[in-house]
Structures are given as C-alpha cells and as structure tokens.
Amino acid sequence: MKKNKRDLGKIKGFTIQFMPYSEIRYLDSTERIRKILGVVLGNNILILQGRLRPEEEARLIGDTMAMIDHIKEFKGIELAVIEGNGMKDFSQDLRKTLQILLLEGI
C-alpha cells in the first residue's frame, strides 16, 4: 500500500509519561500490567523507572497482542530497557530509543 506524501512523517499526538517505580512497587503483577496498559492505551509513551520481572514483561506483551485486533489504531507495545553507568549513558540511550519509535511511526 503506497502512502500519500502528506502522510509521510505524520505522527498522531502522543505524550511521554514518566512513572517512578514507587508507583508500582507494592502492586501485584496484574495491577502493574493494568496500570501500564492504562497509560499506553491513552496513546502515551511510558518511561518506567526500574524494570518489570520477566514473567510480567511476557504477560504485558501477551495482553497487548490480544488487544491489537479489538482496539482501533492500537498497534501493540514496544519494550526497551535502557541501562547505563550514568546519566549521560541514560540520556543517550533514551534519545536513540525515542528516535526509533518516532521513525517507526509509533
């Protein structure tokens, strides 16, 4: 399917939201996934401090795959883990990750 030139590079509105780990620390896995999906389904890019457990990541991916056919314009979720030895590494990795997401048209 060929895109119209006006459609190239056009990105629908989105928001970047930061969620500190303290917001999900005491939630069980189901509540964590529900909270993350609530943010993502609102057309937001979520930056989560900390990391989900591997089984939570798998469940999050599975849940979003099940939603793709049922929620209009929902394309799924992309997980990227940014690790670094300092703020410089983090900011460089974050910038690269956001560039990739924007180029893919989120």
Image (cartoon, rainbow, N blue to C red):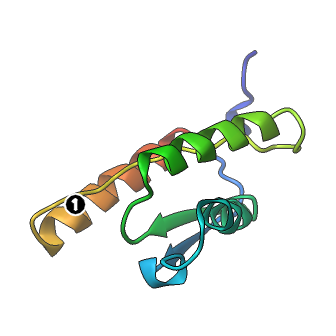
**Which x, y percent locates residue 102?**
51, 49
Image quarter hosting the N terminus: top right
Structural crowding at the residue carrying mark 1, measured as other residues with C-alpha within 10 Å and reported as few (<14), some (14–19) or many (≥20): few
Residue 105 showing in the rendered view: no
Visible residue check, residue 36:
yes
Question: Image point 66% across, 37% down: which residue?
Answer: 62
**Residue at image location 15% in from the left, 63% down from the top:** 89
Horizontal side of 66 relative to 8 (left or right) equals: right
Q: Where does residue 35 sit, x and y in percent of width and height?
A: 67, 69
Outermost left residue: 85
Q: Write the residue at 61% across / 43% down.
A: 59
User: How many numbered discs?
Assistant: 1
Residue 65, located in which quarter of the rendered image? Answer: top right
Decide if residue 105 is on the left or right side of residue 84: right
| Residue matched to label 1 | 92
Mark 1 is on which residue type? Gln
Q: Secondary structure at mark 1?
A: helix
Q: Quick check: 58 above or below 99?
A: above
